[in-house]
Image (spheres, rainbow, N blue to C red):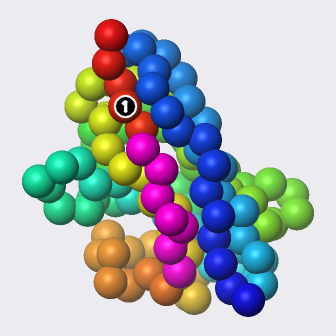
Amino acid sequence: QVQLVQSGGGLVQPGGSLRLSCAASGFTLDQRAIGWFRQAPGKERERVGCMTGRLGFTIYADSVKGRFTISRDNSETTMYLQMDSLKPEDTAVYYCTVKTGRYCSTSPQQYDYWGQGTQVTVSS
């Protein structure tokens, strides 16, 4: 069965760090584009960042560039989102996602599998 299961998230103070994990079952991640999206209340789902399949090039939204890092482990079954220097405006539900193809896309509709979502709240 193909699925993505997320863990991590929670409440953190501004300036703090969190790491989100996303474990894949039923397939490996090495040949597929992997992405992280987020959705704040009343806003559209936006792409935080993406890593291409095979070569692993990464691209990030301007709002998180230099603060967030996407990675995947050597087993190619778990992906991560390391979030540093968190700001209140980073508060949202975060989703991991995977495309069948290896190239990234900004459109959520282009992704085939989604994690269940996890809440990240940045507040003092």
Task: Pinpoint residue 76: horizontal percent, then vertical percent.
Answer: 80, 66
Can you see residue 55? no
For the residue pair 4 and 104, the one nearer the viewer reads as: 4
For the residue pair 116 and 82, the one nearer the viewer reads as: 116
**Picture quarter with the C terminus:** top left
Task: Pinpoint residue 13: horizontal percent, then vertical percent.
Answer: 41, 14
Q: How many marks?
A: 1
Quick one: SS at disc 1? strand
Task: From this view, report whether residue 91 is shown above or below residue 105.
Answer: above
Residue lying at 32% horizontally and 83% vertically, measured from the top left:
109
* Residue 95 figure quarter: bottom left
Query: Which residue has dot 1 on it?
Result: 121
Q: Is 117 colored magenta in this rendering?
A: yes
Task: From this view, report whether residue 86 is shown above or below residue 98.
Answer: above
Task: Pinpoint residue 106: horizontal percent, then vertical percent.
Answer: 32, 70
Task: From this view, report whether residue 96 is shown above or below residue 53.
Answer: above
Q: Is 37 colored magenta in this rendering?
A: no
In the picture, measured across the screen, residue 34 lies left or right of residue 77, that is left
Q: Residue furthest left?
A: 42
For the residue pair 102 and 89, the one nearer the viewer reads as: 89
The segment highlighted magenta reads 113-119
In the picture, measured across the screen, residue 53 lies left or right of residue 45, that is right
